[in-house]
């Protein structure tokens, strides 16, 4: 039974890798094209297209499940979504995404106000869009912003990679010994894991009332680390749900980093910036699938929860990056204040 379980886990890991690999390379092309293009023509077209892509992917996934088609057809849905600029969707919520994505496309097309004023015509198929993304990280006139962009991008990459990697393994972990969860507990566990999104949203709003964004992000990372450590050691159902509960603020750090990245570039570079962020997210999905789905079967013989512990250790790096940038910015502000203060000679 253990051998069969490991074979199934290895097969799941291989298909996850193939699907994410296909979506990553297609998305890498499309998102770096559409993002900078939106800096000229406006945001509305690039909001409609990904929503349509998500709806198409959801429709393909539903057809695969109901018609019991070969799992390779999941790759088709992933490619369609990636071609229109989007990335991973969660299979369990395909019905909700099919309704929500169509609604989002209609809202973006007819109701949403354009943030680029005035929009101006621009060619879509041009290398200039890719150069705009490249210039974000290489412009010589803003070395300080370039350094922060690189560091925040690294922190974002590690946070999202661990999130994707852990999320892929939760069900496999719960099905195996010693938890051996049945379908009902698997459903409750999935619901508990998704509550982290709502908890992070509410907690983010509340914490921002009394704390700087940096420290809100640090609390989110600490919540993530603590929850993964508890889950890695979980041998009983109450302990597993305790880990899910501790993760309730785990998603608070990523929107803070997105906001900080947005402040480092001008308004006319927002599309290029978030095109690069989307590429980073696609790479996160790819790396997470390859690393965590390979690590899990390789460590079953000595610690089933080791990938979660590994993820918690990795998260110490973004925690250090976020804290270091805040301290560095504070020192810069203090030095400017000191330079502006009058000297005794002025008296």
Image (spheres, rainbow, N blue to C red):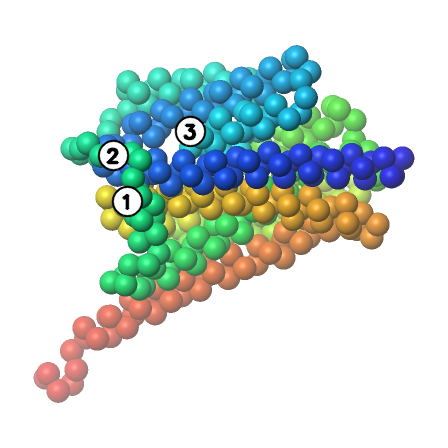
Q: CA distance from mark 3 to mark 2?
A: 17 Å
Q: Quadrant of the C terminus?
A: bottom left
Residue 164, given in percent of the width and then of the height, sits at 58, 41
Q: Secondary structure at mark 2?
A: loop
**Vertical side of 172 occupied by 134: above or below:** below
**Vertical side of 50 occupied by 220: above or below:** below
**Vertical side of 15 occupied by 340: above or below:** below
Query: According to the image, label 2 marks what residue?
Result: 123
Residues marked 1 and 2 touching at CB (< 8 Å): yes
Q: Earlier in the sequence, mark 3 or mark 2?
A: 3
Residue 11, given in percent of the width and then of the height, sits at 74, 35
Report the residue that reaches farthest toward the top.
67
Residue at 32 percent of width and 63 percent of height = 144
Q: Which sits in the foreground, 3 or 186?
A: 3
Report the residue that reaches farthest toward the bottom.
345
Q: Quadrant of residue 48?
A: top left
Residue at 31 percent of width and 35 percent of height = 125
Query: According to the image, label 1 marks what residue?
Result: 128
Q: Secondary structure at mark 1?
A: helix
Q: Quadrant of the N terminus?
A: top right
Q: Earlier in the sequence, mark 1 or mark 2?
A: 2
Mark 3 vs mark 2, foreground winner is: 2
For the question of whether residue 328 can be seen, the reply is yes
Query: According to the image, label 3 marks what residue?
Result: 84
């Amino acid at each position: 039974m253990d051998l069969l379980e490991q074979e199934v886990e290895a097969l799941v890991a291989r298909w996850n890798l193939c699907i994410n690999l296909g979506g990553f390379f297609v998305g890498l092309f499309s998102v770096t094209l559409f993002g900078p293009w939106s800096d000229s023509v406006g945001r509305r077209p690039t909001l409609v297209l990904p929503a349509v892509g998500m709806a198409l992917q959801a429709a393909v996934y539903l057809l695969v499940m109901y018609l019991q088609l070969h799992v390779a057809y999941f790759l088709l849905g992933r490619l369609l979504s990636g071609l229109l600029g989007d990335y991973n969707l969660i299979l369990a919520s395909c019905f909700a995404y099919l309704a929500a994505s169509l609604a989002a496309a209609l809202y973006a097309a007819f109701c949403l106000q354009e943030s680029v004023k005035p929009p101006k015509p621009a060619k879509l198929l041009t290398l200039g869009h890719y150069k705009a993304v490249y210039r974000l990280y290489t412009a010589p006139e803003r070395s300080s912003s370039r350094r922060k962009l690189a560091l925040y991008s690294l922190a974002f990459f590690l946070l999202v990679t661990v999130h994707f990697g852990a999320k892929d393994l939760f069900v496999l972990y719960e099905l195996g010994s010693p938890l051996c969860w049945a379908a009902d507990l698997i459903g409750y566990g999935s619901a508990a894991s998704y509550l982290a999104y709502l908890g992070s949203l509410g907690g983010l709003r509340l914490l921002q009332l009394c704390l700087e964004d940096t420290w809100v992000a640090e609390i989110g990372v600490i919540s993530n680390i603590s929850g993964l450590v508890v889950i890695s050691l979980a041998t009983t159902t109450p302990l597993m749900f305790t880990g899910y509960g501790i993760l309730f603020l785990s998603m608070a750090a990523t929107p803070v980093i997105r906001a900080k990245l947005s402040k480092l570039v001008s308004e006319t570079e927002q599309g290029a910036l978030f095109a690069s962020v989307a590429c980073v997210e696609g790479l996160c999905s790819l790396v997470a699938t390859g690393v965590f789905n390979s690590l899990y079967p390789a460590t079953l013989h000595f610690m089933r929860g080791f990938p979660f512990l590994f993820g918690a250790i990795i998260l110490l790096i973004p925690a250090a990056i976020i804290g270091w940038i805040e301290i560095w910015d504070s020192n810069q502000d203090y030095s400017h204040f000191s330079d502006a203060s009058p000297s005794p000679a002025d008296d």
